[in-house]
């Protein structure tokens, strides 16, 4: 190897060693920046309101018979589900929207008074109570919240068919669920 190359190799080696030493000396006195932190807290509030729903109400039911017969919903009662988180409980009422069930055939002037229609449910035990236009009948009551999936309520109806023309007589029954 030529003397120029040897001196150049020695110079490069020394230069590299000096650079490494300088970096080590400079790095030894330098400390990395520390991350700054700060903390704060917040309060979370969840306001739970009282709610009640009446769902799955049987959309319609039919009582069929001849005049003088007592007919019931029997195996096809009216069913509904009440769901509430109100720990005081709830009531369910039913009331006819009109004073009479009206015929479907044009020209038929007969009607069936809604007070001939009787209901029983959990609030009545085994007794049947006549409906009354303008006065809701309590058909279920509970002094605590429903289950998480709601409470299924069943109402049976009966009527003694009055002496009217053959026809289908209809009316609307309004159910209302109310928290206590």
Image (tube, rainbow, N blue to C red):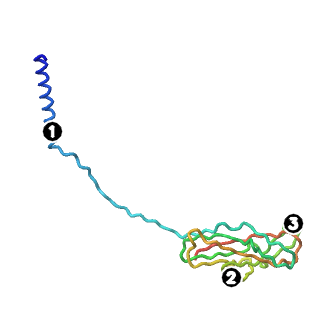
In the picture, measured across the screen, residue 80 lies left or right of residue 3, that is right
Contact (CB < 8 A) between labels 1 and 2? no
**Residue 154: quarter of image:** bottom right
**Residue 73: quarter of image:** bottom right
Lower position in the chain sequence, tag 1 or tag 3: 1
* 10 Å crowding of disc 2: few (<14), some (14-19), many (20+): few
Q: Nearer the viewer, residue 70 or 161?
A: 70
Give the residue drawn at x 84%, y 74%: 65
Position above or below: 113 against 48: below
Give the residue drawn at x 74%, y 74%: 96
Q: Distance from label 1 to label 2 (Cα)?
A: 94 Å
Mark number displayed over residue 105: 3
Q: Which residue is mark 2?
A: 125
Lower position in the chain sequence, tag 3 or tag 2: 3
> What is the x, y in percent for residue 136?
69, 77
Q: Secondary structure at mark 2?
A: loop
Q: Which residue is mark 1?
A: 24
């Amino acid at each position: 190897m030529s003397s120029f190359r040897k001196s150049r190799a020695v110079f490069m080696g020394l230069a590299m060693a000096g650079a490494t030493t300088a970096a080590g000396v400079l790095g030894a006195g330098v400390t990395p920046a520390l991350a700054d932190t700060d903390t704060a807290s917040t309060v979370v509030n969840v306001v739970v309101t009282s709610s009640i729903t009446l769902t799955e109400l049987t959309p319609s039911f039919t009582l069929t018979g001849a005049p003088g017969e007592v007919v019931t919903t029997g195996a096809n009662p009216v069913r509904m589900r009440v769901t509430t988180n109100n720990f005081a409980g709830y009531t369910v009422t039913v009331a006819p929207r009109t004073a009479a069930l009206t015929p479907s055939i044009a020209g038929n002037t007969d009607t069936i008074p809604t007070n001939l229609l009787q209901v029983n449910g959990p609030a009545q035990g085994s007794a049947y109570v006549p409906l009354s236009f303008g006065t809701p009948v309590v058909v279920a009551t509970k002094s605590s919240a429903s289950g998480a999936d709601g409470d299924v309520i069943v109402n049976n109806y009966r009527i003694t068919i009055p002496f009217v023309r053959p026809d289908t007589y209809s009316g609307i029954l309004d159910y209302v669920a109310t928290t206590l």
